[in-house]
Image (cartoon, grey):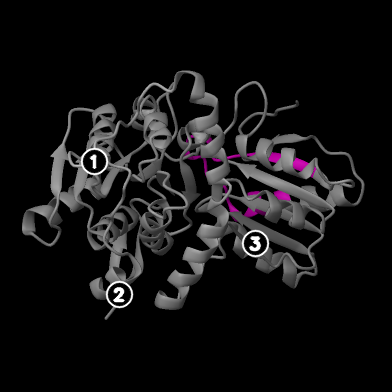
């Protein structure tokens, strides 16, 4: 039977990995991810997880070791954060191009310089082009569930792509909350033992990660076409998971009070909880506001965003990142999609939370007010910084 446990987000990751039974864990600690790999090492040491635990010398080695293990058909796990993810970045396209379904937890943390420890999304969003599936979690329960779903999605023969499960550093990794822990037998029924033909085999020799030469373009065309199949697999796995464990996540995008909304705010990660509270309060005041919880950045949920944008008068995107010299990366993706509409809603890119700066309920209400005024025809700046200590005009 399932049971309730009181754990941090990092520990929720470790519990999910234990339930998923990977064969190999390659680990290198980096704050605020460290607790996750420490707890996994405890499970390996006490025998509750029978796996090979590799404490490697760097994040680059962690991903390289995971790739090597995946190449011989092992289910693998690794984890990182911030500069560690960037150090891994050379290996990420190797993994995705070779179609190895590695699952990795990334504890979102800002990038240097200046140096900071708290959470924004600049690390993971910088790797959108690496060929990895990317999902963003709101709380510890979703984090645990997404680790388990990630293995089922990634290892699906229609997919065979690595997956990055992102959770906000400290806000989720170090915050304790009640989480429902599924029983091992239930997880085993949901997540069967991993088998694959995409592996090195002495009885059936093949090459992996070889030089494609003139076929390089076609390999990546196939990778793109297969990635377009992933949304339907995500929806399918989400339904299966919900049917078994009672928790559904609405697949690629969760819409909250969007059916009759005049304006909506798009969020990513833990700030969604704050925004949901504000939507409830403003609805009681008669404002037709809605919330779009964007769960997956790759593959990008184009059809869902198009449908939502076609029904509203203004759409805001809250980015906890900025592509310096232009705009927020999430906004770029949403804006490109919305531009396909014959009549598109007004749009504002709200940039906040950089370096872990707080985004309060008052800040969120201010964003909705800006969108309501835009919907009434008032002129607004396209890019607005939230809770900044200086003014910005651009």
Q: Residues within 10 Å of mark 1 (few under 14, many from 20)?
A: few
Rendered-image quadrant of the N terminus: bottom left
Judge whether residue 278 is colored magenta: no
Left or right: 53 in relation to 322:
left
Residue 58 location (% of width, % of height):
23, 28
Task: Indicate the quadrant where residue 383 lies.
Answer: top right
Q: Closer to the camera, 268 or 186? A: 186
Residue 159 location (% of width, % of height):
46, 50
Rendered-image quadrant of the C terminus: top right
Q: Is 127 situated above or below 311?
A: above
**Who's the residue at 78% across and 56% down the image?**
263
Q: Is 208 situated above or below 199?
A: above
Check disc 3 and report the residue beneath it: 278
Mark 1 or 3, nearer chain start: 1
Disc 1/disc 3 C-alpha distance (Å): 58 Å
Q: Nearer the viewer, mark 2 or mark 1?
A: 1
Instruction: State if disc 3 and disc 2 touch (CB < 8 Å).
Output: no
Q: Closer to the camera, 287 or 181? A: 181
Check disc 2 and report the residue beneath it: 186
Q: Nearer the viewer, mark 2 or mark 3?
A: 2
Instruction: State if disc 1 and disc 2 touch (CB < 8 Å).
Output: no
Name the residue at the right extreme: 377
Residue 203 location (% of width, % of height):
18, 42
Mark 2 or 3, nearer chain start: 2
**Who's the residue at 31% across and 72% down the image?**
189
Check disc 1 and report the residue beneath it: 204
Highlighted magenta segment, given as a residue range:
347-367
């Amino acid at each position: 039977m399932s049971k309730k446990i009181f754990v941090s987000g990092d520990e929720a990751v470790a519990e999910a990995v234990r339930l998923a039974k990977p064969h190999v864990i390659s680990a290198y600690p980096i704050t605020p991810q460290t607790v996750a790999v420490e707890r996994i090492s405890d499970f390996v040491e006490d025998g509750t997880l029978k796996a090979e635990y590799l404490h490697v010398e760097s994040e680059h080695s962690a991903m390289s070791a995971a790739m090597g293990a995946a190449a011989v058909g092992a289910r693998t796990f690794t984890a990182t954060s911030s500069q560690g993810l960037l150090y891994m970045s050379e290996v990420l396209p190797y993994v995705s191009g070779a179609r190895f379904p590695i699952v990795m937890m990334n504890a979102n943390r800002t990038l240097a310089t200046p140096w900071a420890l708290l959470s924004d999304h600049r690390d993971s969003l910088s790797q959108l082009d690496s060929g990895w599936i990317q999902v963003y979690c709101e709380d510890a329960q979703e984090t645990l569930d997404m680790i388990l779903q990630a293995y089922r999605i990634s290892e699906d023969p229609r997919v065979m792509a690595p997956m990055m499960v992102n959770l906000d550093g400290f806000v989720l990794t170090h915050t304790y909350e009640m989480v429902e822990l599924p029983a091992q037998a239930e997880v085993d029924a949901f997540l069967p033992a991993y088998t694959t033909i995409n592996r090195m085999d002495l009885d059936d020799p093949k090459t992996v990660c070889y030089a494609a030469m003139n076929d390089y373009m076609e390999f990546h065309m196939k990778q793109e076409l297969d990635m377009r199949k992933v949304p339907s697999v995500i929806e399918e796995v989400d339904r299966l998971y919900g049917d078994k464990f009672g928790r559904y996540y609405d697949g690629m995008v969760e819409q909250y009070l969007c059916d009759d909304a005049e304006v909506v705010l798009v969020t990513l990660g833990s700030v969604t909880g704050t925004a949901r509270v504000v939507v409830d309060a403003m609805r009681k005041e008669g404002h037709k506001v809605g919330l779009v919880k964007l769960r997956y950045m790759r593959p990008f949920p184009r059809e869902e965003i198009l449908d939502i944008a076609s029904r509203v008068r203004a759409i805001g995107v809250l980015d906890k990142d900025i592509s310096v010299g232009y705009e927020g990366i999430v906004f770029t993706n949403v804006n490109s999609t919305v531009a396909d509409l014959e009549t598109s809603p007004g749009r504002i890119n709200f940039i906040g939370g950089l370096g872990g700066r707080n985004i309060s309920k008052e800040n969120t209400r201010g964003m909705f007010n800006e969108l309501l005024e835009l919907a009434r025809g008032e002129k607004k700046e396209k890019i607005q910084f939230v809770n900044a200590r200086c003014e910005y005009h651009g």
